[in-house]
Image (tube, rainbow, N blue to C red):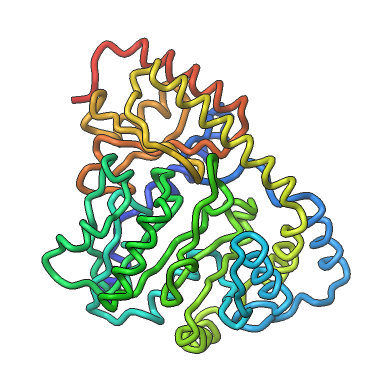
Amino acid sequence: MTLKLSNRSDIPVFRVLDILRIVNERIAQGEDIIHLDAGQPSDGAPQPALEYGAKILKSGTGLGYTEAMGMPLLRDRIALHYKQHYGIDLPHERIAVTMGASGGFILSFLTVFDAGDRVALAAPGYPAYRNILRTIDITPVEIPAGPETNYQPTVEHLEALEEPIDGLIIASPSNPCGTIIPPDELEKLCAWCDKNGVRLIADEIYHGVTFDEPAETVLRYTENAVIAQSFSKYFAMTGWRLGWLVLPEDVAPRLKALAESLFVAPPTLAQHIAYKTFDHFDVLDGYVARYKANLDILKAELPKAGITKLSDTKGAFYLYADIGNLTNDSERFCRDMLDEAKVSATPGLDFDLERGHQTMRISFAGKTEDIREACRRIQEWRAKKTSNYR
């Protein structure tokens, strides 16, 4: 007898996590592999924040459930962050601490969209957006975006859609391309959404990881957007699984009701540590300076291996490479680079189902010496190749 399985789980594999699993297994077996795959800082949360968490852990107190929306102390600190860094006053009642940004996406999508709704997003884009949407019976409407718009959606894209949409997801800085939406374009997108009754979801989890100028928040232009943030990227707390949302006033109580039943509360120890990370921007900004150095190395060295078409990365820690001059099979290309050069990267099919066979994403969140060595290995590997993957 065959037992029932839900169609909700019939979604594409999240390739970068599959690659991370494979690479970690091979490293555990003794292989010398350099990670350019997962978007994970090589350094963790600032040491003083971890020591504060250790004291909480040893005391055995303050580790029970917090409120479903998170500790008021942490929510107040997040609100102060918006005041100090953006000049925006934000009551903590509009802030929800979540189980990573991923938990925040689940909660926000469930709160503001219904089954059957249509939500637009750029391709290439973060694959979990479309996978979560499909899981809850919402239709992702992918907008093919290219280097001419910095791989970002524009009002012109939205106006050209054949059917109305109920929502729009934007990411600035973006994953996988590291591009930023300029303030004037961001304002236009916010105005278009407000005018057309479209709920905007703004992924701002890479704010803080920018190299020329800060990324602007949509809070500057609209009160109707849901903003997703994370302690994983700038704050370097990937494994602690903690994020936050900034919510419109009418959304907050509805999301709170869902959070209580779906997650009960975010991880308590992680919240204590996150609270203390705000005292150590000097350490975190040092991480960002290293990412910038890594980016400069890749931009100088990858063209020597024939990888010449690179995204105009201004934030996050990703380069998106058009490798169509080298291959029509990005999965094989990345697999061979892993097997032969011992360098792992993510094939573009994770981010763009239609055009990703000619692209790959390179993460440069690691140590600078590893980035230099990865470039050397890739150059040596490409020099030995007598043919491309066609």
The relative height of residue 74 versus residue 354 in the rendered view (above or below) is below
Left or right? Give the position of 270 relative to 302.
Answer: right
| Residue 278 x/y as whole percent | 72, 59
Name the residue located 26 percent from the left edge and 41 percent from the top edge. Answer: 148
In front of the other: 359 or 250: 250
| Residue 368 x/y as whole percent | 61, 28
Quarter of the picture holding the N terminus = bottom left
| Residue 156 x/y as whole percent | 21, 57
In front of the other: 107 or 81: 81
> Is residue 380 visible from the viewing direction of this image?
yes
Name the residue located 44 percent from the left edge and 36 percent from the top edge. Answer: 362
Left or right? Give the position of 136 relative to 274.
Answer: left
In front of the other: 90 or 371: 90
Left or right? Give the position of 102 relative to 288.
Answer: left
Name the residue located 67 percent from the left edge and 44 percent from the top edge. Answer: 285
Left or right? Give the position of 297 relative to 240.
Answer: left
The relative height of residue 380 versus residue 209 in the rendered view (above or below) is above
Report which quarter residue 308 is drawn in.
Answer: top left
Quarter of the picture holding the C terminus = top left
Report which quarter residue 225 is drawn in.
Answer: bottom left
The relative height of residue 191 versus residue 212 in the rendered view (above or below) is below
In front of the other: 45 or 143: 143
Which residue of the protein is positioned furthest toward the left in this rendering? 162
| Residue 270 x/y as whole percent | 69, 65
Name the residue located 66 percent from the left edge and 74 percent from the top edge. Answer: 75
Q: How many marks?
A: 0
